[in-house]
Every structure is written in structure tokens, then in C-alpha cells.
Image (cartoon, rainbow, N blue to C red):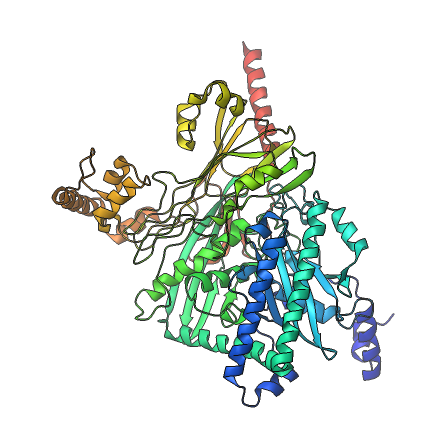
Amino acid sequence: MANVADAKNLSSEDKEILEKFLKANQLFHGPDQEIMNNHGLCPRSEEEERILSVEFDPHMANLCRGRILAALDESHTMVEQMGVAPGAKWGDIVTTIFTANGDMASTGTHGLVAFASVVGYPIRFINKYWVDDSSVGVHDGDAFIHNDSRYGNIHNTDQSMMMPVFWDGKLVCWVSSTIHEGENGAIEPGGMPSIAESKFDEGLKMCPFKVASNDELRRDIVTFLQNSVRDPKLQLADMKVKLHVAIRLRKRIHSIIEEFGVDSLIGTLRKSLEDTDAMVKERIKEIPNGTYRINTFLDSTLRENLLSKVPMRVTIKDGQMTWNFNGAAPQYTNRSINSVGASFKTCLATGLTLYVWPDLPKNQAAFAPIDVEFDENSLLNSSVDAPNAMSLLAIFRAFSLPALTLAKAQYCMPKRFTAISAPSYNQPATFVYGGLTQHSEITGNFCADINGNGTGGRENKDGEHALSPVFGYMADTGEMELAEEELPFVRLVSQKLAKDRVGFGKYRSGQGYEQIATVRQSSEFGFMSGQCGAKFSTAPGLFGGYSCPSYPLAKIKNINILETLAKNPEQFDFDMVELMNAQKIPGGKYSTQGAMNFEFCNEGEIYMICQGAGGGYGDVLDRAPEMVIKDIEDGLLSQETALRMYKVAFNPDNLVLDLEETENLRQEERQARIKRGIPYDEFVQSWVKDKPPEGVPYAGSWGDDDSLLYVNAPGVPPRSIQAGSEGVMLANPKDLRISSLEQEVAQLKQQLGAN
């Protein structure tokens, strides 16, 4: 057999034969890192160069672009009206058009940009590997499906259908439809398994493959997919929806070509991208040179409490913007909260276009000019072998970090494109559910409470209550009454705003809402909750504003609240805090925790979570006293908290303000702050440590050295590792608990023996 040296000496003809053989016999078409690492635009194709090398009519392009947006909005509505998954009904969807090369050219006025951006990766994969493959090929009437984030997705619960659009036998563009389907056959029901220890626990891992030919789904493939999930009706129904939405989009694209010509379509798609790219570069040039930083932390891996560092450092220098995430926590090789770097970048792009430059067209070029730097094998840029089914914990920070960091750069700029705001709540606070319904059907999915995040306080007004998810702007929280017809899931309290749970500031954040749930008419149905933030606030305040509170999950086991409501309704309070503090229901086991792995809920047991608030903006002592009183009247603020936080004096009986006493209280507080303060150098000397405190579970860099990561995790000997060198494997919490109990038993035996 020829060795490597012999291969180098082959003739050009033999090399061609060898390359052809290797290409035809590649062992495995795994995720292509060259594709996954490139979030920029593809070079112009020959067609694009030909069309745009001469004058291109901007008026025609505007008309063409309008037709495209109308088609995308129409198809988005089709998904909402016909989709079966909760995510389809409540807006966790998008329809998109791509250039022939796979650049995301446009979404409609609705839909989730992150869902659209990631689909460019599998389209590029199809173009590279399947177009010329005789066993696959790409033809008119074909459709491809995928969900694996390692080939381009947020996480495995999202399924995308991609369809090529041909004209006169030539591929001119791609269209797609994406739905957060939920159930996907993972180790826990609902599609987002918190206990996944490897990628093989995550359920369906669909690399891009052909699922339809001649506009018809292949039932053998569909049956295989149905056989792999808990809800086969859902899988079939939404595959049909996505296929026919793609067909409708293709029809609209054909109409555009008939009206304006194929060159106009191709040129408009490319011109839109290049114009956006140029616009972003000009905006970057306007930002003052400098480096702007923020550090935040996850407080849970969904199985243990652990502070995992998520840093962001934005550097602007001479018109170039670089977003750096070096020093983040290492990947957890047997925990599901890791993120694929490409997925994280698409969410950063979403955060940029939602909260910093919302006027930009929603296309791939909005983020293309920005460089992103990651450590390999990190929590934010994990390897292909690391599980990432619950990447939402890390990825949700990507939606809020851009606005939080760039606010420091924008503050002094005379021109801004939206109001500076503190971050919205950025956790997936919802119940994932699964089990046997009252109709004797097996199901699993998630609730849309995740779509009601409280927004951050802004530079000119308060945040909005439960306005929209941090990852989108056109989504809904759904109707619980409709869900209860299909599920044994009952809401005792649904979307109730609660007191004293905002991010305080000159302008307070918007509030989230409480959710109190139980189960009836099923003995095999349960819940999971995948959020963190029970111990460490997830949405920081801005410019002196307070962070949002922390939000633990609470539950009352060993009761039947349905019987209590029938016999002793006075024992139930429609309030999470009162239920937990008063503990009126006899025999109940009251407990709180952070994230919760899937567990069965006996009929009538209570589970409670709170959708969180955003961060506050500005100093609380600058808040207008009248606005404080209005919050008390609206039930958002207690009188005690108003006095303690805002130093506002008023008559407690009629809420009449005492402005003179308010000013006195605020001046006293300002003087007290001065007395509490110490010089900066003294503060640094007393506060800054060389390494993380012992006993604090922590993972990530410390100080100025991003290359060294400290790891002090439960069941793992404390150590330091080089960033990017390796991941961390965590002990099973049950094993640690068993070991602890065994030690207690041994000590008790020793004490008994001594006696």
C-alpha cells in the first residue's frame, strides 16, 4: 500500500483518481466544521456577479423585496393556523428564503431570526455533499429535513424543512419552514432532556436528508421518524405542514420570477445582503474605539448547583468589531447545557437585531461583519460529542448580552437606533411536560410561558410586562383553556403578576408572572423545568439599576389540591409566596429547588414557577415618586418595598405623597452611601482574590488570564485546566448522595458500636 510520501509523488491524473475515490468512499459525512465556523456571507456566485456587475434597478428591487416579504408573512400565518405543536400555535416558528448558496436572505415581519439563521448551515451542507451525490441529488420537488444542532440548529426540538427552488432547470434559491416541535424521542419527554449525559440521549439527530420527492413525503422515512418519538401524530402532521408551506413559498417565488424575471430575484436577494453588510460596517465605524465587558453566570447545570462563567468582551478598533468569549466555562461532557458555537452566534445576531439595531433587515448580513472568538471545547462552543439538548441555558444569555454590553458603547453616541435598555429576562421559564393524557394518549412537549419574558427598564421609560420572549418579538403565550382540553395539565394560577419581583431602577423592568399547576385525570403525567437563576440573578441591571430577583421552583407534594378546593378552599392562596410561607394545607411536603428533572406529578400535587422580570435601568433614587405610587396602586409594589427601595414617603392609608419628606429620605440615603463607600483601590484590595473562593462550585477563568480555567465542581477534585484543552465530566448527583448517606450510616454504626 502506498504511504503518504508516495501519494505526494502521484501524477495529476492519479491524484484525480485518488481524490475521486476518497470522495466516493468517505466513511461518514459528519458535521462540517468549515461550514459551521463561517457565519459570514458566501462569495458572489457567477450568476450574482453577472447580474450585479451592471446597474441594478433599486425600484424594481424594492418591489421584488416587498413581494418576498408578503410571501414570507403569508407562509408564517399558514404555519400558525395549521401547525399542531404548541410552538407552532404560539409563534416559535419562522419561514425563510435563502440564496442558492445558502445565505439567509430574509425572514418575514414575524418569526424568530435565530431559527432562520441556523438553517443556512444545513443548506450549505446539502449544496456541498448531496447535490452531486448520485444516491441523493437535489431536484425540483425535493424537500430535506433536519434538527441536529451540530449541522446547524438551536437544539434538537426544532425541526426544519428545506426546499430548493428551480427555474428553467436551475437552482435559484432555497426556502424553509422551522417549528419548535418539542417531543423528539429523547430520554425525557418534551424534547429538552435535562438528564441527557451524551448526544445519544437527545432523541432524533437528523442530519440534513431528503424526506420528500415530487412534492410528496416519503412514508417509509416518515414512519421511521414517527416510530422514534412519543407523539407520532405530531411528527406526521407538522411534517405535512412544513412541506406544504414550502410548496406555497415556492409558488410565490415562481410568481415573483414571472413578474420581474429570475435575474431580479437573484439580484434582489444578494443586493439586500450586501447593502445590509455595508450598513453594519458603517455603524461600527461610528462607535468609539474601546473594549466593553460583562460577566454573567449560570447557577445550575440542571442537575447540580454550579456557577458557570459566561463572559462577553466587545472590542471596537478602527471600524472592526470583535466579540470575544474566551474564558467561558469548559464544556460539560455529560451535561446537556452546552451550546454549539454556530448556534450561539445566530442568537447573538438575534440579540443585536432585536435590541441594538432593530431597524436592520432580518438577514444574515446583519452579523456577517462581526468577528467572534471562542475557546474550543467550551460551554459556548462545545465539541460535536458534547450533549446540548438544553443549550437554552447558555444560549438565552446570547440574546441579552449584546444590548447589555453595547449599551456602554452607545451611551455617549449622539445617534442611536433604539432606546438603550437593560436586558429582558433571559431564562426558559416554563414547564416541560409528558406522559399519559386523560385521553389515553402518550405525549410530551412544552408550554409557551417561555414567551412572556418581562423586558428591561429603558433609558426613557419602564419595561413592559410579559411582552415577548427574549429571543423574538412576535410570539404568544397561548390559551391554557385550549391546552387543558388535550392535557391533564391544569393551571390553578396562570400568568398572574406578583408584587416586588421587578428589577428596580429609575425605570423599573417589566414583570413576568406566576404559574401554579397540577395534574388531574392521569396517574402517569409529570413535569420538568429547565431554567436556572434560582440562586444567581440572570438579568443584570444597567447604569445603577438592580438585577431581577432569583426565581426558585416550589412544589407541594403529598396533597390533592383538587380535594382541598372542594372541601376547604380557604386553605389555598392564589399566590406562590403565601402558599409556601403560610403552609396552610395540612400534610403537604413543601420544598424549593432550582431546575427540576422530569418527575411524575400525582393528581392534585402543586408545582409553581415564576416567569422572571428584566433588569432595572438607572438609580432607584432618581425614580419619580409618582411612578412609585402608581406601581403600588397597580399591585406591582408593596408599600414596605416602596419605602425601602425608593425612599418614598406617603400616607399608607390613601397613598398621598409627601414630596418634602421623600427628598429628605433620599438625601439621607445618598449620605449613607457615601459613608458606606470606600476608595476604589481599597475596595479592589479587599474584594479581588487570586482565585475562586474554596467551597464555591465554580467553572471558568478568573481575573485577567482567560487561558486558565478553574474547575471546582461537585464530585470533581478542584483543579485548573487550559482553556480549550478538555471538557469536564461531572459525577452523578445520585452517586454523590448515596456516598454521603453511606458515610452517615458508617458514622452512626461507629457511634452505636462505641456505646
Asked if residue 576 lies left or right of residue 197, the reply is: left
Q: Can residue 175 be seen in this view?
A: yes
Residue at (18%, 39%) from the top-left corner?
650
Against 129, is 155 above or below? above
Where is residue 736? Give x, y as percent: 59, 32
Residue at (14%, 45%) from the top-left corner?
659
Where is residue 494? Give x, y as percent: 47, 38
Q: Name the image quarter holding residue 152.
A: bottom right
Judged from this view, the residue extending furthest toward the right is 1
Where is residue 660? Give x, y as percent: 12, 44
Q: Can residue 598 be seen in this view?
A: no
Against 714, is 558 above or below? above
Q: Nearer the viewer, residue 1 or 256?
A: 256
Judged from this view, the residue extending furthest toward the top is 755
Where is residue 566? Give x, y as percent: 50, 21
Q: Name the image quarter holding residue 496.
A: top left
Residue at (49%, 41%) from the top-left corner?
697
Asked if residue 152 lies left or right of residue 453, the reply is: right
Asked if residue 174 lies left or right of residue 26, the reply is: left
Residue at (78%, 50%) from the top-left corner?
224
Against 603, is 199 above or below? below
